[in-house]
């Protein structure tokens, strides 16, 4: 089974968007909402919000593509092999970087963040070691459920449009269950894999039916325009919230779901035709880049500060390019070393 290079391109686009989000987030707060600079940062930051959902979509697609035959039948042996392989790839670097970021917090806060075993274990369990590590908790949940998702979908013979509709209905049901009950006990919805059911189920169906799905091009005629319209709508609603104008949470989240799902589907199509080696390489190394880049961002944010708007823009661009390049170089350098599995997976 050959490597799906288009998924590397998709992940390359997603990790580019992640770094864009984190390097532009300060500008989104810094500038007045009526300024041109604010609008530029708003568009870049909000349009890049497909990043984590695209990673979850790509992971679901790849796992279902690779294991579609094996998990047509669930056995203890298959489950053991799957979990051992997947967990050993993600848990050691997650534990390493949780400690690194705990140490970083300890240094930055002058010891206000306790450097203790208890605090470390708490961060490991919750994914709160740093603002981006929640993603690992989502992926661990995805690994837990994926064999059963693949088993279920591989035994249900339905068309893609029907799968999309069913997934959307399940997502809506979970959303209202969460808002009505779960939110009172757990407020971090974005860390639950069920928050991304639409992307997980859709990606899994495509992975199982990959050859048949990718032969058809009719979906892009719908997905791309929907992604553009919903993306602009999402930016507009976010802007209204920044102006303290009331927007129903259900409407805001609905537009977000439409945007990130249609964007992921559109980018899969684009990635099959956008064979850029640098994006392929970035996608292949994306987990390491994802883990490393916030540490570099925290360093660069403390190096330079200016009140000059043009210099601020130039430094933000320089920061984006430097963090991307250095994260890539470090991950690539570590990839073939004995330390790789403990640091970059």
Image (cartoon, rainbow, N blue to C red):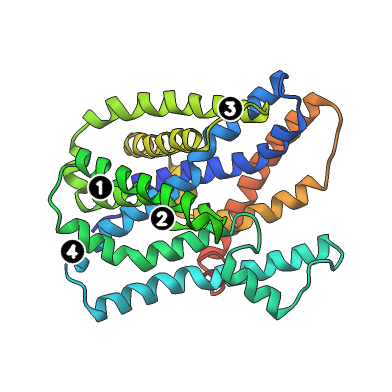
Q: Determine which residue is flagged by label 4.
A: 69
Q: Determine which residue is flagged by label 1.
A: 206
Residue 281 showing in the rendered view? no
The answer to the question of whether label 3 and label 4 lie on touching residues, with beta carbons closer than 8 A, is: no
Instruction: Give the alpha-carbon distance from disc 2 to disc 1, as whole Å.
Output: 18 Å
What is the number of callouts on the image? 4
- As helix, strand or loop, the secondary structure at mark 1 comes to helix
- As helix, strand or loop, the secondary structure at mark 3 comes to helix
- As helix, strand or loop, the secondary structure at mark 4 comes to loop
**Which comes before the other along the chain, label 4 or label 1?**
4
Residue 217 percent location from the top left of the image: 22, 31
Placement of 32 over or under 284, stated as above or below: above
Q: Determine which residue is flagged by label 3.
A: 43
Q: Determine which residue is flagged by label 2.
A: 194
Residue at image point 73% right, 19% down: 35
Query: Which circle marks residue 124 in the picture?
Result: none
Q: Nearer the viewer, mark 2 or mark 1?
A: 2
The answer to the question of whether label 2 and label 4 lie on touching residues, with beta carbons closer than 8 A, is: no
**Which comes before the other along the chain, label 1 or label 3?**
3
Placement of 141 over or under 289, stated as above or below: below
**Which comes before the other along the chain, label 2 or label 1?**
2
The answer to the question of whether label 4 and label 1 lie on touching residues, with beta carbons closer than 8 A, is: no
Q: Nearer the viewer, mark 2 or mark 4?
A: 2
The answer to the question of whether label 1 and label 3 lie on touching residues, with beta carbons closer than 8 A, is: no
Instruction: Give the alpha-carbon distance from disc 3 to disc 4, as whole Å.
Output: 42 Å
**Which comes before the other along the chain, label 2 or label 4?**
4
Residue 187 percent location from the top left of the image: 57, 55
Task: State the image quarter where residue 236 is shown.
Answer: top right
- As helix, strand or loop, the secondary structure at mark 2 comes to helix
Mark 3 neighbour class, 10 Å CA radius: few under 14, some 14 to 19, many 20 or more: some
Query: Can you say which quadrant of the picture contains the N terminus?
Result: bottom left
Residue 49 percent location from the top left of the image: 52, 39
């Amino acid at each position: 089974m050959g490597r799906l290079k288009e998924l590397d391109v998709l992940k390359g686009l997603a990790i580019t968007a992640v770094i864009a989000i984190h390097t532009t987030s300060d500008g989104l707060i810094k500038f007045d909402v009526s300024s041109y600079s604010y609008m530029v940062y708003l568009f870049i930051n909000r349009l890049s919000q497909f990043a984590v959902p695209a990673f979850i979509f790509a992971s679901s697609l790849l796992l279902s593509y690779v294991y579609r035959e094996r998990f047509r039948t669930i056995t203890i042996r298959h489950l053991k092999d799957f979990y051992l392989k997947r967990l050993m790839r993600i848990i050691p670097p997650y534990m390493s970087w949780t400690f690194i970021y705990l140490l970083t917090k300890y240094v930055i806060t002058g010891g206000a963040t306790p450097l203790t075993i208890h605090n470390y274990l708490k961060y490991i369990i919750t994914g709160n070691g740093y603002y981006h590590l929640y993603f690992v908790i989502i992926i661990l949940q995805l690994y837990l459920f994926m064999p059963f998702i693949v088993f279920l979908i591989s035994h249900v013979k339905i068309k893609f449009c029907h799968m999309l509709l069913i997934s959307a209905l399940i997502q809506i049901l979970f959303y209202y269950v969460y808002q009505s009950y779960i939110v009172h006990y757990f407020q971090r919805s974005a860390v639950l894999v069920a928050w991304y059911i639409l992307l997980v189920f859709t990606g899994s169906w495509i992975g199982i039916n990959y050859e048949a799905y990718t032969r058809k091009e009719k979906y892009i005629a719908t997905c791309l325009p929907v992604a553009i319209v919903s993306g602009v709508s999402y930016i507009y609603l976010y802007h209204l919230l920044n102006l303290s104008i009331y927007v129903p949470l259900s409407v805001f989240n609905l537009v977000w779901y439409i945007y990130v799902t249609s964007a992921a589907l559109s980018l899969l199509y684009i990635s099959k035709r956008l064979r850029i080696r640098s994006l392929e390489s970035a996608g292949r190394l994306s987990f390491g880049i994802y883990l490393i880049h916030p540490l570099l961002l925290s360093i660069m944010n403390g190096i330079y500060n200016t009140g000059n708007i043009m210099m601020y823009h130039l430094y933000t661009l320089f920061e984006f390019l430097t963090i991307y390049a250095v994260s890539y170089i470090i991950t690539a350098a570590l990839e073939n070393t004995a330390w790789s599995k403990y640091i970059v997976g």
